[in-house]
Amino acid sequence: MTELAIKADKISKKFGQFTAIENISLRINKGSIYGFLGPNGCGKSTTIRTLTGLLSPTSGDIEVLGLKIPEDADKLRFKIGYMTQKFSLYEDLTVEENLKFIGNIFALGKKELQERCQEQLATYGLNHLKNQIVSGMSGGQKQRLGLACATMHKPELLFLDEPTSAVDPENRRDFWEKLFDLSEAGTTILVATHYMDEAERCHKLAIMESGQMRADDTPEALMAQMGVNIVEIKTPGLRKLKLKLMEQDEVRSAAQLGVRLRVLIYQSIKKPVQWLLSNFPELEYAELEQVRPTLEDVFVAVTGKGRQ
């Protein structure tokens, strides 16, 4: 039986009359990468802060690495790393000084501190920047430093709150390679993101909306269970066609992608291509193809207007 890093049952957090998260339940395996996918304001950050003990839940039970939260939050802090969306290290210190500062916070001995600094500089490609003042670094370099600092004390569990929102695709890809290295070594990782491609990299993920979990499974399972078929249409007059399609109860959504219209049709329609051709004569000479779902399709299917 796989050991759990996090077990949370029906946790809610209210701020006055506002409910930030409601009845969130989680089972996260040790060594896995678990994602929270959702738009800004959906409750991702509140969930993470509640799991770390930074916020106390209004209701519900939380156990992280065998510790009850928030009661044992002080003990937990030495077992976790936390990296926020906004770079939060010291801009007027050098790269090496930031690493040493974090190491001292976690009470690393002099020899261990020196060894860990050298390891982190090499692992995250910062050797040539160790004497660089942080304020003069690029966004990608700061991101690597942020991850190096967050893992300075070899945490068992790493929380990442939209860590790649300010970097380019190449740096995001390299960042994720480092996360897979950490996961392979046994570190459990929770990452909040609004990037679909990042969410697909997770071993398992939750789709969140308005403080609630709309779905929770592996990306592959979510795509297989979404309850719609997808047809792409290439034909002139896509904007007019979209309006007509959206009037049909059988259509979950339609969105234009370049010269194609991507249409989500409920699975009650067994042959969606034939259904479209039968009901829309203007598609007689159009190109229609049933295609595999993406995580973006899953997100559309389980959130927003028309959710079933």
Image: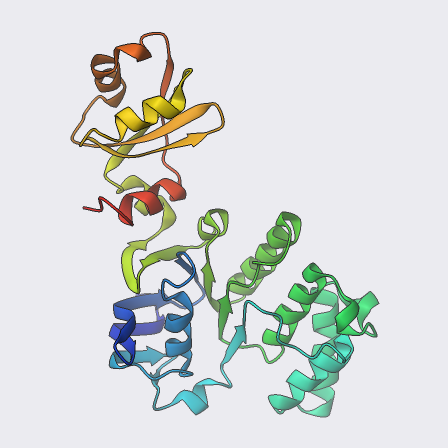
Residue 187 seen in this snapshot: no
Q: Is residue 81 above or below residue 290?
A: below
Question: Which residue is outermost to the top?
Answer: 285
Residue 106 is situated, as x and y percent measured from the top left of the image, at 60, 88
Q: Is residue 248 above or below residue 77?
A: above
Residue 2 is situated, as x and y percent measured from the top left of the image, at 34, 66
- The total of numbered circles placed on residues is 0
Quadrant housing residue 167: bottom right
Residue 66 is situated, as x and y percent measured from the top left of the image, at 35, 82
Q: Is residue 62 above or below residue 302?
A: below
Of 225 and 113, which appears nearest the observer?
Answer: 225
Residue at position x 73%, y 61% from top?
138
Residue 228 is situated, as x and y percent measured from the top left of the image, at 25, 35
Q: Is residue 242 left or right of residue 45?
A: left
Q: Is residue 142 left or right of residue 6?
A: right
Quadrant housing residue 45: bottom left
Residue at position x 46%, y 55% from top?
194
* Quadrant of image for the N terminus: bottom left
Residue 278 seen in this snapshot: yes
Of 69 and 263, which appears nearest the observer?
Answer: 263
Residue at position x 52%, y 61% from top?
184
Of 207 and 26, which appears nearest the observer?
Answer: 207
